[in-house]
Each structure stands twice: as C-alpha cells, then as structure tokens.
Amino acid sequence: MGLFDFVKDAGAKIFDRKPKGESAEEQVAELRKAAELLRFAQSMKLPVQDLRVDFNNGVATVHGTAESTAIKENIVIGIGNVEGVAQVDDRMQVVTPEPPAQFYTIKPGDSLSKIAKAYYGDPMKYTVIFEANQPMLKDPDLIYPGQVVRIPAIES
C-alpha cells in the first residue's frame, strides 16, 4: 500500500475535457471521473472484490481486495496510466501477498527488450515484463513515454 506517482498528462484518455465550473460542478466532475476510473479498472477483468475508486484533484484512491500482489499492482498501474491521474493512493488489501514488483516509467527510445536487458541482463526476457503487464499491454511494441509498467522479480 502507498502513494504512487504517475505522469498526469500521459496515458489512456477516458475523461471528457470539460472546463471547470463552480465548486459543486467540480465535485460532480470528480465523482464522474471516479466512476469512469472504476469502469476502466473493471474493464481490465482482473479479479478484485469490492473494488472502489475515489478521485480528487488528480489523485485516485483505490480500495478493494485482490487475490495477489500482481493483480493489485496491475490495477494501480492501469488506473495510474490514465491521462489526468497524477497519483494513485493504494488502499487495496491482498489475500496472498508476494514480494512487490518494481515500477518503471517508460522513457523515449525504450523498448521492453531494452528494459529487460537493464533489469534481467537478457533482452529476450521482455516477455516476462509483457506478461506481467497484461491486460494493460496488448502488444509488446506498443508502449509510450510516461507509461508505467511492472518489472517483476525473477529467479536467475
């Protein structure tokens, strides 16, 4: 659990870009964004019980119970990789905890094989990173600067 930083202006575009209005209108807009984030997280089809997302001023707070740390991390990263989300406050519980993965923010010129070489010493282990980030990643060649991915620990 904790607070994770993301690149607010990078990621999936799921929010309507409407100008801010009065305070009550801003609150309604934040509630709408929370509902959109929840639908987005549910569309990942990861097994999380009692999933709930709150959103306030660029911070998404995520609640629920995941079966594993990997599932929890994928929910956190999926929500964090939405444009307009600057931070994710992880309040999720895990049924079967395991060591957490490292998070890596994609830079211009990066590829999963380049990242795998840096973390694992073997560019062919890019598939480990790709599989660890599904369903968020659909293709190992479709990553973008500012996107955050999980880098799981592996045994040598």
Image: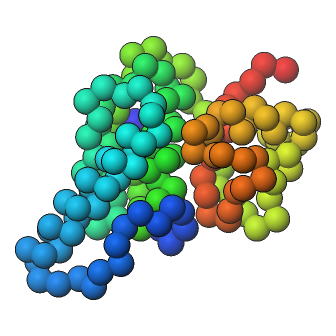
Rendering coords of residue 62 (x, y %): 32, 43
Is 102 situated left or right of 140 in this image?
left
Q: How many marks?
A: 0
Rendering coords of residue 137 (x, y %): 64, 46
Residue drawn where x is 35% and y is 78% of the image = 17
> Outermost residue, left direction?
24
Q: Is residue 113 above or below residue 25?
A: above
Rendering coords of residue 28 (x, y %): 15, 67
Looking at this view, is 23 or 127 the one in front?
127
Residue drawn where x is 54% and y is 28% of the image = 70
Specify whether residue 4 is in view: no
Rendering coords of residue 77 (x, y %): 51, 46
Q: Is residue 150 above or below residue 10?
A: above
Residue drawn where x is 84% and y is 34% of the image = 125
Specify whether residue 137 is in view: yes
Q: How is the image coloured?
A: rainbow
Residue 99 picture quarter: top right
Q: Is residue 49 above or below residue 33?
A: above
Is 123 situated left or right of 6 in this image?
right
Q: Is residue 94 above or below residue 116?
A: above
Locate the C terminus and report the quarter of the image it occupies. top right
Looking at this view, is 146 or 100 the one in front?
146
Locate the N terminus and report the quarter of the image it occupies. top left
